[in-house]
Image (tube, rainbow, N blue to C red):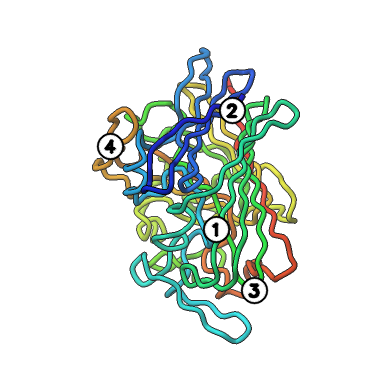
Amino acid sequence: MIKKELFGKLDDVNEIYIYTLSNLKGMIVKIINYGAIVVSILVPDKNGIYDDIVLGYDNLKAYINDKFYFGAIIGRYANRINKGQFELNGKRYQLELNDGLNHLHGGTKGFHKVVWDAEPFIYNSDQSLKLKYYSHDGEGGYPGNLKIMVIYTLTQNNELQIEYIAETDKKTILNPTHHSYFNLSGSADKTILEHQIKINADYIVDINEDLTPTGKLINVNNTPFDFRKFREMGARINDKNELLAFANGYDHSFVLNDYNHSVRKVAEVFEPVSGRLLSIHSDQPGLQFYSGNYLNGSIIGKEGKIYSFRAGFCLEAQHFPDSPNHKNFPPVVLEPGQRYIQRTMYKFSIKQ
């Protein structure tokens, strides 16, 4: 049975609930219907000890005030759009500028700040939570009435599957993603710099100083962005490199190999002390690797923990930033009559 409990009240009308998904191995995932946010993920270490390996908060008020997108579904467009502008059918659209002179993560009232309709269900012994949201034409500056559904499924193999399904009644752009901050040590007191990461990408998207793309791709050979073999996240994070300096660390879109719209393994992260291994599988062309560069010690998280600089990392499967303005990037346009489908999976295991 999927447990449902009151998490808080957004106002006199909207009650926010927390849903607890669990499997026979003891893995637990907790999700709220505000922002479709993953609040916690409990998985065992090599000694069978269960820890929460994502950053977050204990109460609804903190999520309402959150500016770091902890655990949320992001949209309509994840990442940055240069000057918040794009063109469809000869018409130029202007989005909110909430990241300097650019648009970021759907704006201040994106998918991460709305109430979703939630429906728990069980299929073949796997527990799932279906979340639906109706985004009206013009919301956030985006065209089209958009119906989007996100389905979280916890499998018996310690996999958290995320499926996105959407339809529109007007030509629009769409690029949702998931934004959990992971720390596989299970202790946010530790940084993520000793985590070992592997990303199946020969190129990254080149960026300007404002973190928007130039339109070019850069080969990772002989750069701090070469994670084609396991390497510590912190091994070269302080190298003298212009792109690292722009982001104060890693906040870059990796061009994933073997993109053909099918799900494949795209990245792995290993934490040697706990033995936890996270494998990421997705059908997306890009993966945004973010090393928690804006965490600054001012955030009080779950159980009163202080989230300091680089206390968590994000690996967000998505399309490239600013894709509507770069014809050489995979397209992000959704037409009426089309069905948008995206699949990403986070799989947890132990590596000795």
Q: Residue at x 50, y 25 (%)?
A: 42
> Is 50 placed left or right of 327 in the picture?
left
Q: Residue at x 46, y 43 (%)?
A: 71
SS type, badge 3: loop
Q: Residue 176, how many percent across, how many down?
A: 56, 56
Q: Nearer the viewer, residue 324 or 269?
A: 324
Residue sitting at the far top: 47
SS type, badge 2: loop
Distance in Å between CA atoms under marks 4 and 3: 42 Å
Distance in Å between CA atoms under marks 1 and 2: 40 Å
Q: Which residue carries the number 2 mark?
A: 2
Camera-nearest label, 4 or 3: 3
Q: Quadrant of residue 144?
A: bottom right
Q: Residue 318, how many percent across, how many down?
A: 58, 55
**Where 120 sits versus 252, above or below?**
above
Q: Which residue carries the number 3 mark?
A: 170
Q: Quadrant of residue 194?
A: top left
Looking at marks 4 and 2 on the same chain, the residue that comes earlier in the sequence is marked by 2
Looking at marks 4 and 3 on the same chain, the residue that comes earlier in the sequence is marked by 3
Q: Amino acid at mark 3?
A: Lys
Q: Which residue carries the number 1 mark?
A: 204
Q: Residue at x 43, y 67 (%)?
A: 103
Distance in Å between CA atoms under marks 1 and 4: 33 Å
Res 300 label: 4
